Image: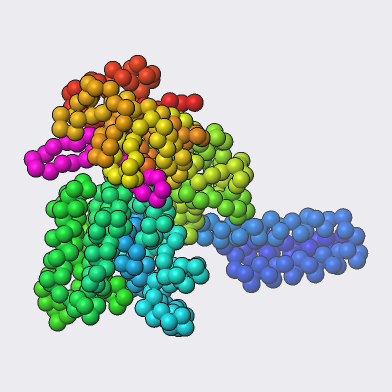
Amino acid sequence: MDIEAEIRALQLDSAEDGNGMAIPEDAKPEEVEMTDKVEKVEMSDKVEEEGTKDEVDTKSQPAQDEPKVKDKEVAALEDAEGTNEMESQKKRHLNVVFIGHVDAGKSTTGGQILFLSGQVDDRTIQKYEKEAKDKSRESWYMAYIMDTNEEERVKGKTVEVGRAHFETETTRFTILDAPGHKSYVPNMISGASQADVGVLVISARKGEFETGYERGGQTREHVQLAKTLGVTKLLVVVNKMDDHTVNWSKERYDEIESKMIPFLRSSGYNVKKDVLFLPISGLVGTNMKTRVDKSTCPWWNGPCLFEALDSIEVPLRDPKGPFRMPIIDKFKDMGTVVMGKVESGSICEGDSLLVMPNKAQVKVIAVYCDENKVRRAGPGENLRVRLSGIEEEDIVAGFVLTSIVKAIPAVTEFTAQLQILELLENAIFTAGYKAVLHIHSVVEECEIVELLQQIDPKTRKPMKKKVLFVKNGAVVVCRVQVNSLICIEKFSDFPQLGRFTLRTEGKTVAYCLKDFVRRGKQIVVRLILLCCISEEESSRLLLYMLHYGSIGLIVLRES
């Protein structure tokens, strides 16, 4: 019994030293250790003489208090992560797609941007220089930053859309490096559909600009596709100005600008407001992060590339709208992970969402933005989202992650107004015409079921004569049918989910159009998709809209 009294006395003494607490939460580590040692010594004495009856009581105090210290450390780490997340979210975010003809220097320019912004170190650059030299391709080393797989490096051609991130003082940028070869235009469409801003890279080298610009060149097709896919702002960078055939010649720069401006206007761009030209050298980085020196280019007084990108306004986005994220890729990583760009709404950990069109209900386990885990993300962000409740094999690129309330419609047939660009030789556009439909991340075979009306582009009214077929340049209202359910939306609500193009045999033959609106001498192309309840109502509404000069119609039939 004397031993028990001594133990109680020791406990009371330790409590008095700790301001009335056995082990306070703010105790120093040494004090905690000393208390543990005393407890262990006393416990061993008690085991020898009295047994282990009161062992639990004497050990309970320190065992309960240690987790409190750990909880504080975890809470502090979480607060720090939250602070970093808040700081990163303060910067505005833009998605930039690099487009243009093959070998114009898109990957090299993108790689140089990453190097100048500190995303790539000197040692990595030296490694790429050696690798390129071993392949007798010394000028390709900057492109290796963006072109990561061996096939792209050997051929010198981008195949898949490269993705990277860099920051300036005011803006976070996601670079989307689109392939320039005509064989990979579907991949270019995938990249452009995620972009807010386009950087059209044009080679100033003699012969290279002409190859890309003439009929059939990818400079033309990329511009038309970018406009159709919603890229409203365009930076036209005239690259390779340091080439020995150019030598920063103002005459060559003016020649390229004078040829591009009429074509950009005809493609629907407002050249004064939405397009900016500037000369650069992507290989050596001239006029990119800092303005070109007057000794190199005395005639240029405009901004450098970084300044031009920083000056672009962020498009309007709705963080409170229904959630929409077209899925561009998926993989397994401790669950099912999907990738895509948020077009509308916001997403948080723990949210319950739907994967359409298969209507699978899922739960958000984790959200990653620019490789960093975040608790919340808004529209315009490129995300990786870990989901539970669905397997990877049940998801296909083109599916849409959507909110349960106001879910995106899934359809197999719709009516749209199309602008026919250039059909294949000796081809006519009629019922039974088959093509490949590209809309957001969907690539799906489709068939023209019926031509409903041909529209007179000048009067914006339907022609009275029943239309059986149309040729190049025609505007036609038709019914389009796809083999599988696809997700499509009203343009007025979700522009990026209401634009599409039709391609066949590697050529863009038509795109969705809603009418020509004349303003002065310019022709402005608009696209608006409207939902209707029935065919009868849609027909009446179409006639009403065309009569009063409105801008168009698409009918979505839910299956």
Q: Position of residue 239 (x, y in %)?
A: 25, 69
Q: Residue at x 35, y 16 (%)?
A: 536
Q: Which residue is at the front of the view, 343 or 515?
A: 515
Q: Residue at x 71, y 58 (%)?
A: 63
Report whether 467 appears left or right of 142.
left
Q: How many marks?
A: 0
Residue 108 visible to the viewer: yes
Q: Position of residue 37 (x, y in %)?
A: 74, 70
Magenta segment includes 495: no
Report whether 266 appears left or right of 397.
left
Magenta-colored span? 503-529
Residue 469 drawn above or below residue 427:
above
Magenta segment includes 517: yes
Report whether 407 appears left or right of 104.
right
Residue 504 drawn above or below residue 256:
above
Q: Which residue is at the front of the view, 206 or 32?
A: 206
Q: Residue at x 64, y 57 (%)?
A: 67
Q: Which residue is at the front of the view, 234 or 516?
A: 516
Name, please, the residue furthest toward the front. 426
Residue 354 drawn above or below residue 280:
above
What secondary structure prevails in the magenta region? strand
Location of the N terminus by quadrant is bottom right
Q: Position of residue 128 (x, y in %)?
A: 44, 78
Residue 222 drawn above or below residue 268:
below
State the image quarter where residue 32 is shown. bottom right
State the image quarter where residue 453 is shown. top left
